[in-house]
Image (cartoon, rainbow, N blue to C red):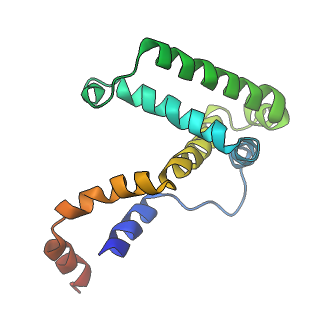
Amino acid sequence: MIKYIALTFALLCPLPAVAQSQGDVLGRCLADNTTGKDRKDLARWIFVAMAAHPEIRDLASVSPEAGEQTSRAMGALVTRLLAESCPKEVQSVARGEGSQAMKKAFETLGRLAMLELTSNAEVGASVAGFERYVDKAKLTAVFESK
């Protein structure tokens, strides 16, 4: 059952294209120039941003100071990556594919940040917690029907 659920989630992630676009090249540069700490800082910033949503706010309490710190860390990270680590790739994207390629590059980095967190055993256990509530009989019927 678990393998079917994992396969479903894996199918939601797009496969990389064979030809590398400028966004792909920038995404690789961003990934190659971040550390595990950088990716955790990015994940913290994403978490703080999501915690600001009115329907999620009750699940996490983020102090203004913590919000400011994550924004400061993210600003420094983005500045370092775009201006120091990957300026040629950024310029190529800016001249060619534009904002969509930039978005794609940061989506790649965001996926890495999430992988950084989900590789933790405690996070994995929390993610798997929903499995207790899945109607396995219904899903088995779906996957086994021909």
Height in image: 32 above or below 50? below
- The outermost residue toward the bottom is 146
Count how many numbered circles sit on residues in the image: 0
Residue 36 position, x and y percent, is: 65, 44
Q: Is residue 138 left or right of residue 116?
A: left
Q: Which is nearer the eye, 123 or 54?
A: 123
Q: Quadrant of the C terminus?
A: bottom left
Height in image: 7 above or below 95? below
| Residue in the image at 77% along x and 33% along y | 90
Q: Is residue 93 left or right of residue 122?
A: right
| Residue in the image at 68% along x and 28% along y | 77
Residue 3 lies in quadrant: bottom left
| Residue in the image at 72% along x and 59% along y | 19
Residue 20 position, x and y percent, is: 73, 55
Residue 2 position, x and y percent, is: 33, 72
| Residue in the image at 52% along x and 56% along y | 119
Residue 82 lies in quadrant: top right
